[in-house]
Amino acid sequence: MTQLTATPASPKKRQLIQNIAGPETFNLAALSLSSLVFSLGKLTVYAADQSQFIVYSLGALAISQCLVVALLAIVGKLLPRAALGKYFPVLVVVAVLLVNILGTFLFEVILRTWNLEPITQSQLQRTISLMFTTFIYLGFGWVSAALDSNFRQVNIGKELLTTLSKQQLELSLTIKEARTFAIREVSLEIQSTRGTLENFVGTSSRNQDIDIEISHLNETLDEVESRIGKISNRFPDLVRIPRIGSRSNSTLSSVINASTQKNDVLPGLISIFAFFGFSSWLSYFLTDAYAFFWGIVLSISSFVIFWAYENYVVTKVTSLPVLIRVLIYEAIVIAYLFFWLLILGYFAGDDSGSYSAALAYAAIPFIFFNGGAVIGGIVTLSQEHRENLTAKAATLRKDMADLEQIRSDEDKVWKSLFVGDIALSPTTASVILRDATLTKDQERVAAAIPNVHALWKSVLDKLPTLA
């Protein structure tokens, strides 16, 4: 028997939905910008239709949109407290729609209260307007979420790098302290052994066999000193620690430079903005069907133009100076918006007032297109900074692994010299030699020196792995 199961949404798709319609939608800055864009669009329509009442329209818009922003901010505080789970994005969209419907209703009520009649809208016009408004609010919320996520990850990367740097410094200090103590002890025993030999040679009669043994012992001591010196220079006194800035090095020139790089998201956003913008504006001067048709045509045209720019122009001008790249982008945007202005002005009418309103309306996408490019540059810079921090963290982890291996290797040797078998330690060697020379007995010294030499040879055998 076949059991039907629902296919769960992929984590990436779920994350995308949560970013588009999530808590960041109610970010106060995002709400304010969204309200401003919506208000400018609506204001240009009323300016074209009733320019003598523009001040009243502006006042009504200001009051209604302030209420919309305030209500959405309150909703944004209340919704996350409820255990909504997978329904949260749906409720975000519903909240944006309902509050903006209330805002539109309040705007029209205020106009009627002032004895002004609002522009009559068909059901399709209101639907397109609400869809456009929802797109604006969700879009700014999505951008806010993307920026917040990148900056948060950058901060996490900085904290991780700081922690790793401190751990690296502590580990290097531990190694140096153990090394300093051990090398000092070995050096003291070498000096003690040499001093004992010098005193013995200066106060005793010469014996060829003993002289040969002493010569071999001194050679071994020289080799021990050489290898001890190599150990002390195994890494610099100042261990490499990457410099961590308190913020990313995002200057105005770097943001502009990043803004002129390829942006695969921009053509799609521009085409959606163009569809809703054209449809909303043209619906006041054309039938609903014609406005919808021209909105689709101009949306597709917008996508093709900017897709071609991103794929065939940006890739060819990356080597040019930033100023040239900016001028190329602005020339394309202005040429496109001039085409936009001609179409809007043509459908709106031939009078200068309609063209003035169309020009004002065209200024909105000009700001939007440039703002989208700049925000894309900021996102790119934050991602590059995050990747740079990740690379530095990987380098630090590798350095710490190398330091940990050094610490482990040296710790075994120091323990074998000073904590392990005491009979094989440098201290024992110097004590045996000193006790033998104090007796002035040539035979006892001759018997002790080979044993002392053997002890120092065992010390030497433990050092090559560190050299």
Image (spheres, rainbow, N blue to C red):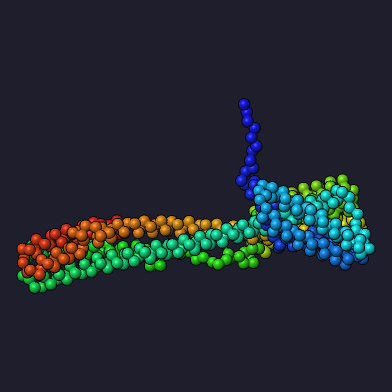
Quadrant where the N terminus lies? top right
Q: Nearer the viewer, residue 260 or 142?
A: 142
Which residue is pictured at 85% across the width and 48% down the height?
124
Residue 8: x percent and y percent? 63, 40
Residue 370: x percent and y percent? 72, 60
Which residue is pictured at 78% across the width and 52% down the height?
97
Residue 273: x percent and y percent? 76, 53
Which quadrant holds residue 239? bottom left
Q: Nearer the viewer, residue 194 or 341?
A: 194
Q: Nearer the viewer, residue 275 or 440?
A: 440
Residue 228: x percent and y percent? 28, 64
Which quadrant holds residue 109? bottom right
Furthest residue in direction right, as rendered: 115
- Say left or right for 422 vs 270: left
Q: Nearer the viewer, residue 434 or 69?
A: 69
Furthest residue in direction front, as rendered: 82
Which residue is pictured at 74% across the width and 56% down the height?
137
In this rendering, the count of numbered labels is 0
The answer to whether residue 329 is visible is no
- Say left or right for 324 vs 199: right
Which residue is pictured at 16% across the width and 66% down the height?
431
